[in-house]
Amino acid sequence: MYPQQIIDALRTVKYPGTGKDIVESGMLEDDIRISGFEVSFSLIFPSQQDPFQKSLLKAAETAIKTYVDPNAAVNIHSKYTKQTAPAKTEKPLPQVKNIIAVASGKGGVGKSTVTANLAIALASQGFSVGLLDADIHGPSIPRMFNVEDARPVSTDVDGRELIVPIEQYGVKMLSIGFFVDPNNAVVWRGGLASNAVKQLLLDADWGELDYLLIDMPPGTSDIHLTVVQTVELTGVVIVTTPQPVALIDARKGVDMFQNDKMGVPVLGIIENMSYFTPAELPENKYYIFGKDGGKRLAEELGVPFLGQIPLVQSIRQAADDGMPIALQAGHPATQIYQSIAQKLNI
């Protein structure tokens, strides 16, 4: 083995935060040592809290065993740059006027579809909009915006390396889905997932935004607490279906954000899949999951009821095709999303 082989092998390892290889990114320290089958070197990370550190060390070791020598004994040391901490401000994202989390008590209620369409509806009303996909284990925003193959790059902003969001349909967005293989499960412990969300939230060049929507993971988790502790949320929107099982979890979601630990205003409840309307009978409504459950819950909890979204095939099809229904100006569902977006105009 010789140093250039090591360097060439490490060029195959990409840093998820920038998409560049670790050699090009300047992460490889000039301290490669080779003794027989043993090789050692250092990788430089921005901080000890870097969420990609563990996976990157493993990837570097695998690259050397794959491209240099499968019998190599690899010792990698982590070093950290002494970054100047950003100046503390009352708002971690001072250029973002409103940060709204979109959450649900349970999965499968169409929260991500609602978030995507609300973002587009707000953008169509002339607002500058960002969208953070905080569902680390099930990121779906890249698919819904037809940007699965996009890979964000980094840019230097006042001496800080920031991730440049992908822009589509007038919405700036970031998702862990841009940095991982969509066919592989993201198996991360809570702390690692939370740190990744924090990095996507704070280490991004969002620019000036009227609204930043955060598509939260379902349930109640570390990520929810991390988001609340990292930025000052304008409020949260709860998405539910009208069925009793979903309403039980939606109630917990409202309580989570309203309790003393969170203290986040609940801007309202959206009832998704409220009724089924067949395309050939547009005036008919079939209440498959029950009727007005979300509306009654909002009244009971004393929070605004933002609207009912029907269960129609075109909404699902549009999301799967990467062109959310809110892009279709004349569609009845678009008018509903526009109405809900107007109620969020703060």
Image (cartoon, rainbow, N blue to C red):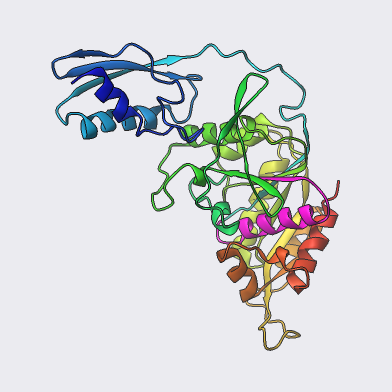
Q: Is residue 227 above or below residue 219?
A: above
- Residue 302 part of the magenta-drawn span: no
Residue 130 at x, y percent in the picture = 70, 44
Asked whether 59 or 164 is in front, the reply is: 164
Q: Quadrant of residue 272?
A: bottom right
Return the x and y of residue 39 as percentages of the image width and height.
Answer: 22, 17
Residue 116, magenta (yes or no): yes
Q: Residue at x 67, y 88 (%)?
A: 280
Figure check: 285 above or below 237: below
In the picture as drawn, the residue positioned furthest to the bottom comes out as 280
Give residue 192's position: percent from left, percent from top: 47, 33
Any part of residue 300 in sight = no
**Residue occupying the far front of the picture:** 4
Q: Against 253, is 34 above or below? A: above
Q: Give the quadrant of residue 163.
A: top right
Quadrant in the rendering for residue 242? bottom right
- Which range is magenta? 107-132
Left or right, residue 74 beside residue 336: left
Along the viewing direction, whichever of 134 and 121 lies nearer the viewer: 121
Image side of residue 265 versus residue 279, left or right:
right
Residue at image x 40%, y 48%? 185
Identify the residue shown where x is 74% and y is 33%: 232
Using the image, determine if residue 158 lies above or below residue 120.
above
Could one spot residue 334 in this view of the protein?
yes
**Residue depicted at x 61% and y 53%:** 105
Looking at the rendered image, the quarter that the N terminus falls into is top left
How many numbered circles are shown?
0
